[in-house]
Structure formats: C-alpha cells, structure tokens
C-alpha cells in the first residue's frame, strides 16, 4: 500500500499526442481547401470533416483538462490519506478537525471514483489506471477507518457491571446449601424465596459507549456505507459487541455449559448457578441488550433492516446460551426442592416477555422470540408436574418406625413450610394450576373438598393437607400406645393449624378450614384424656360398692401404681407448643385433681392418713411435669 504514491506518475502525455494529431489533420484539410483543383463537392466534404475534427479537438482538450483536474484532486486526497499511514496516532484522538479532514478526503475519493466510472472514456487506459489507484487508496482508507472504529469502541466502552456482582462473587460456593428437605422451621423460606438484589440496576438502560462518541461512530458508518464497505463495518461493529457481551458474561459469572453438562450437575451446584442465571437474564435483557439495541439503532438505524440484523447477530449467541440453561433446568429430573427455583425462573421470564418481544421484533429475530416463548411454556409444564408430584409424594410417603415422643413428624414440617413458601408464587400457581385435577383418588376423603369460593391454588393446598393428614393417620398406627397416637396426631394437626393461621396461608385456607382442623386436634386431645385417664378415674369413682375398707385401699393403691406408670412414661412425651401443653395439663388437672380430692375427702379416714401418698397439690405438680420430653419417676412417698 505504501507504493501507491510512488506509482502515481502523470498520465496526460498520451492525450497531448492525440491533440497534436488532430491539429495536424486540420492544417492538411485547410491546405486542400485552398487548392483550385478541388471541386465544390469535395470542398464541402472537407469543410464537414474540418468541423468534426474541430469539435473532436475541443473534446479532447476538455478531457485532458478534466483528467488533469481529477488527477490533481486524487493526488491531494491521497496525500491526506497517506499521511496517516505512517502516523501511530489515531485520527479521532487527534481532534475533530483532523477527523473531519480525513473523512472529507475519503468523500473526495468516492466522488472522484464515481466521476471516473461515469466518464465516457472510463475504459481508456489512462482513466482505468486512475480508477484503480483511487480504489487502492479507498481500500486503504477503509482499513484505517475500521481500525479507528475498533479503537474508539475499545477506548470508550463504558465500564460498568451489575451492582450485585461484587457482593455475590463467591455466591456459588455459599448459596442455598440448605436443602428443602430440612425440617427446621423457616429453612425453606430462607433459601428459596425470591432474591430481589440488584433490582435497581435491572430497570436502567445503560450507555455502552459514551454518548459524545456516537457521532464519531456514526460518521465512520456513513462513509463506509457510502463507499460500499457496509459489510466490513457491520462485521467489525457486530463482532466487537459479541466479544463485549462475552466479557459481561464472565463478569456475571455465567458459564457457557451444554445442556448435557447441566443435566449431569448435582442440584446444590446447579442451584447456585440458577441464582446467578436469574440475575443475569434480567440484567442482560433489560439492561445490556436494551442498551445495545439503542446503540445499534443510533449508529445504523438510517440504513433500514441492517441495524436489526446486526443486533440479532451480536446478541443471539448469549441469548441462546441463557435459553439453553433454562431448558436444561426445565427438562431435568423433577424434585420437590426445585419447584421454587422453577417458579422464580418462570416468573422472571414471563416478566421479561414483552422486553424480548420488543428487542427481537424484526423477522430476523423471530427465532429468539419463539425459543423464549417455548421455554416459558416448558417451565410452566415442569412447575405443574413438579407440584403434582409433590402431592403424590406426600400422600404415599412411607414410614416403618413411629416418631419418638409423639413429636411433630419431619414430613409435617416439610409440607407446611413448603406450602407456606408457595404463597409467594400464588398468582403464578393460580394461573398454572387452573383446570388441573388434584389427584383426589389418592385420598378418598379429599374428594369431599369443595371448589366453591376457592382459587385453584387454595383447592390444591387444601388437598395437600388432606393428603398429609391421611398419611399422618397411617403413621400414628405405628404406635403401640393408643394415648401416644393421639398425642402425635394432636401435635401434628395443631402445627398445621398454627402454620396456616400465622401466615399468608390463612387467606387461601379460610376460617372454615382453621375451625375444622382446630376441632380435629382438640378431639385428639379429648381422646387422649379418655384413653389415658378413664381407667384411673374409674378407681376413684364412687360406684356404690366402696363400703369395704379393703376395696377402697386396693383402689387407692391401684390409682397410685397407675399414676407412677403414666408419670414415668408421659413425662418423656413431648408437646412442643407451650400453650397446647399448658392447656392439656390444665384439662387433665381439672378432671384428675377433682376426682382425687373427692375420693380422698370421703375416704381418708378409711384409708388412713399414713397411707395417703400425695396431696392434691402434689398431684397437680406432678401433672405439670408431663410432656416435657424427659422421662421422670415419682418421688418416694414421704408418708410414714
């Protein structure tokens, strides 16, 4: 390229020779015209030829003048272009005047090229040589402009990153390590609820380059398009932003993994990646790509569909990467703990649907719109299937050993914390579960749940608690002690009522359900008292057959033996809820203490003071030891 100036030798002598030939011919015609031996007809013919040669001479002179002018202008423009070939500085960094001067030189070469192409003698050797040289200079200028474009973009690309990146740089190692299978209260909610971090930046379109530089980039685009180097500009511009988006993916800590690789990934690892994916997909679509499309429109908008084609080309790779990740999660193995992430992903994509439709509204971007819509549908299908699978798992959950001390079963905590977390996604689940059967055939009495005045989610959650109650009833049959069976059912149903009453679930279950299930755990408390204390109280009852002293003493001794056995066993049982434990103790005391006081009051003289082991107050204190979870023994009698 550097030899272009050296090869630019003057090309006008050939035209000057042609001019001399025409002049010589005209002199010969004039000499013949003055000859007396020429006829009138020949004289007229010679005059016509002279006129033609005169015109041709004038055209040739004009062409020589034009060629000289084009040559001078091309030389002048070329000097401006070549001046920067040996200059290590960038044109636009040298100031707007230098840049404007360079662009004007390029426009001059474009004009001269067009002039040479349209010239009648463009096929002549001289003008063809000029045209070739103009093309060479133009090619050189285009290469320089492409380099200038990339330099401007690289040097002036706005440096920014999502606010959450710095706070979550180690997130993959620490997030969501607590499994949903945990039965500790609130563990599910704390690890599965939406993460709202970074929302401030998600709704702000960014400038990918400083706004002041847009006019520079656009000026390069205009001159390259005018020079028919539009493909070169688009290729350079598009590839730059492809690479830039790859860089932002790295900043967002998004790994480009295959669907197969994601399907093989352990849930704890995948869970952390889903958290990052959720933040990234919102940021990339609503912030980054929105800014990128605005930039492409500002630079290429006046060139018609070119700008949308370039935008889609620059963004399709990362978009498909994000969508492939979502698809891998959607088609992966269904597990209950995945439901919340699936719901979150579904809601995020549904919220971004209009953004995607707007970003890729052109025909060339229709395939991305289609894939996005299809992913939302797949996630919705997976949410429904996972939710229904959960109900089936609750109904059919097996047990081989009874729960120690009659406490709240892990399944009860699991289910109630699970559905308590689901409330966050009530609107979405109502949409997805509308018209879906709840599988009531798994639990016969679940078929009696009325649909009246209940949304789809409420109906399914009430069915879930029916499944749970039915399963708990099966588990209670594992207890050999009937009293403990009722304590177990009371504890678990009370927990269910408590979790509904003290949360947003109350709006879905309603007061009727709370009253119904409150009555159920109260009935189990009553049944416990009947099964446990009815035989003991019968020993203290006056049935008209207590006239004999030996019978009274035997009954009293039998009551004490029974009390010691019940005390030893039931102090080891546990009622976790303080109020429920207190209420049951009070109820026991009211029945047992009253009967004991009456019996002792009537028969103390017969039994003998020294044989009465415990006072009523002592007996009441013993009852206060019940259901604390630590087995105890009654103190030895202090009566002598």
Image: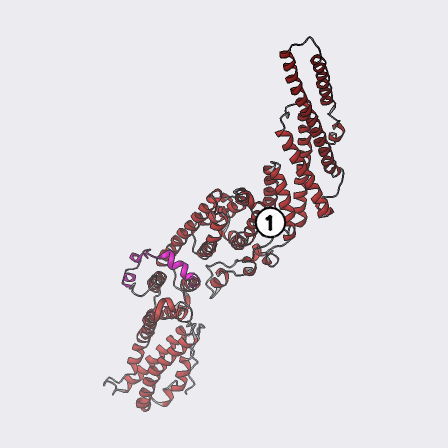
- Please determine whether, in this image, residue 423 is positioned above or below residue 97: below
Mark 1, other Cα within 10 Å: few <14 / some 14–19 / many ≥20: few
**Magenta stretch, overall SS:** helix
- Residue located beneath label 1 in the image: 250
- Left or right? Give the position of 72 relative to 613: right
| Position of the N terminus by quadrant | top right
The extreme bottom residue here reads 605
Query: Which sits in the foreground, 287 or 64?
Result: 64
- Please determine whether, in this image, residue 562 is positioned above or below residue 115: below
Rendered location of residue 637, percent (x, y): 42, 83
Instruction: Choose top left, top right, bottom left or bottom right for residue 428.
Output: bottom left
What residue is rendered at 65% in x and 20% in y? 51
Where disc 1 sits, the SS reads helix
- The residue segment tinted magenta is 422-449
Rendered location of residue 446, percent (x, y): 30, 62
Query: Which sits in the foreground, 310 or 262?
Result: 310
Instruction: Choose top left, top right, bottom left or bottom right for residue 144.
Output: top right
Rendered location of residue 176, percent (x, y): 52, 58
Query: Which sits in the foreground, 53 or 139?
Result: 53
Rendered location of residue 90, percent (x, y): 72, 44
Q: Which colour scheme is used?
A: secondary structure
The extreme left residue here reads 544
Is 42 covered by the magenta stretch? Answer: no
The extreme top residue here reads 37
């Amino acid at each position: 390229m550097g030899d272009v100036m050296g090869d630019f030798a003057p090309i006008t002598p050939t035209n000057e020779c042609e001019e001399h030939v025409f002049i010589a011919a005209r002199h010969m015609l004039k000499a013949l015209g003055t000859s007396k031996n020429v006829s009138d007809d020949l004289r007229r013919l010679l005059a016509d030829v002279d006129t033609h040669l005169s015109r041709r001479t004038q055209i040739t002179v004009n062409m020589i003048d034009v060629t000289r002018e084009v040559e001078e202008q091309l030389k002048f423009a070329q000097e401006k272009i070549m001046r920067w070939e040996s200059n290590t500085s960038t044109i636009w960094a040298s100031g707007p005047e230098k840049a404007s001067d360079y662009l004007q030189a390029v426009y001059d070469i474009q004009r001269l090229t067009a002039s040479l192409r349209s010239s009648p003698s463009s096929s002549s050797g001289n003008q063809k040589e000029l045209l070739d040289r103009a093309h060479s200079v133009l090619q050189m200028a285009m290469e320089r402009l492409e380099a200038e474009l990339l330099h401007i973009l690289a040097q002036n690309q706005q440096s920014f990153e999502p606010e959450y990146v710095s706070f979550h740089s180690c997130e993959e190692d620490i997030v969501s390590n607590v499994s949903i299978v945990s039965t500790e209260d609130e563990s599910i909610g704390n690890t599965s609820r939406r993460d709202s971090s970074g929302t401030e930046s998600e709704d702000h379109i960014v400038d990918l380059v400083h706004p002041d530089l847009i006019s520079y980039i656009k000026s390069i685009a205009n001159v390259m398009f005018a020079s028919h180097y539009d493909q070169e500009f688009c290729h350079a511009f598009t590839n730059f932003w492809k690479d830039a988006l790859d860089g932002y993916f790295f900043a967002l800590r998004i790994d480009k993994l295959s669907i197969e690789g994601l399907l093989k990934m352990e849930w704890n690892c995948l869970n952390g990646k889903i958290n990052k994916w959720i933040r990234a997909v919102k940021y990339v679509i609503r912030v980054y790509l929105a800014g990128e499309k605005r930039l492409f429109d500002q630079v290429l908008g006046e060139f018609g569909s070119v700008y949308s084609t370039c935008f889609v080309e620059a963004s399709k790779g990362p978009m498909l990467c994000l969508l492939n990740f979502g698809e891998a999660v959607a088609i992966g193995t269904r597990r209950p703990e995945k439901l919340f992430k699936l719901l979150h992903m579904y809601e995020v994509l549904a919220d971004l649907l209009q953004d995607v439709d707007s970003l890729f509204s052109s025909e060339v971007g229709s395939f991305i719109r289609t894939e996005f819509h299809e992913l939302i549908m797949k996630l919705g299908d997976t949410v429904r299937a996972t939710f229904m699978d959960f109900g089936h798992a609750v109904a059919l959950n097996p047990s081989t050993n009874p729960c120690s001390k009659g406490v709240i079963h892990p399944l009860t905590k699991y289910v109630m914390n699970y559905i308590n977390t689901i409330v966050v996604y009530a609107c979405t689940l109502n949409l997805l579960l509308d018209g879906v059967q709840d599988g009531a055939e798994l639990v016969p009495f679940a078929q009696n749940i009325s649909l009246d005045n209940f949304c789809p989610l409420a109906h399914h959650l009430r069915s879930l608690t029916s499944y749970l109650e039915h399963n708990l009833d099966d588990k209670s049959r594992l207890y050999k002690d009937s009293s403990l069976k009722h304590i177990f059912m009371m504890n678990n149903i009370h927990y269910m009522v408590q979790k509904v009453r003290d949360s947003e679930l109350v709006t879905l279950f309603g007061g009727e359900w709370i009253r119904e299930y409150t009555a159920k755990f109260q009935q189990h408390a009553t049944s416990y008292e009947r099964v446990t204390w009815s035989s003991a109280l019968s020993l203290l009852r006056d049935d008209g057959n207590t006239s004999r002293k030996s019978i009274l003493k035997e009954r009293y001794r039998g009551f004490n033996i029974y009390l010691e056995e019940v005390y030893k066993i039931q102090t080891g049982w546990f009622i976790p809820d303080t109020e429920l434990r207190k209420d049951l103790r009070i109820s026991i005391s009211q029945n047992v203490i009253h009967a004991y006081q009456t019996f002792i009051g009537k028969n103390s003289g017969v039994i003998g003071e020294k044989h009465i082991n415990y006072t009523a107050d002592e007996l009441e204190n013993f009852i206060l030891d019940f259901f604390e979870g630590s087995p105890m023994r009654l103190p030895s009698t202090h009566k002598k």
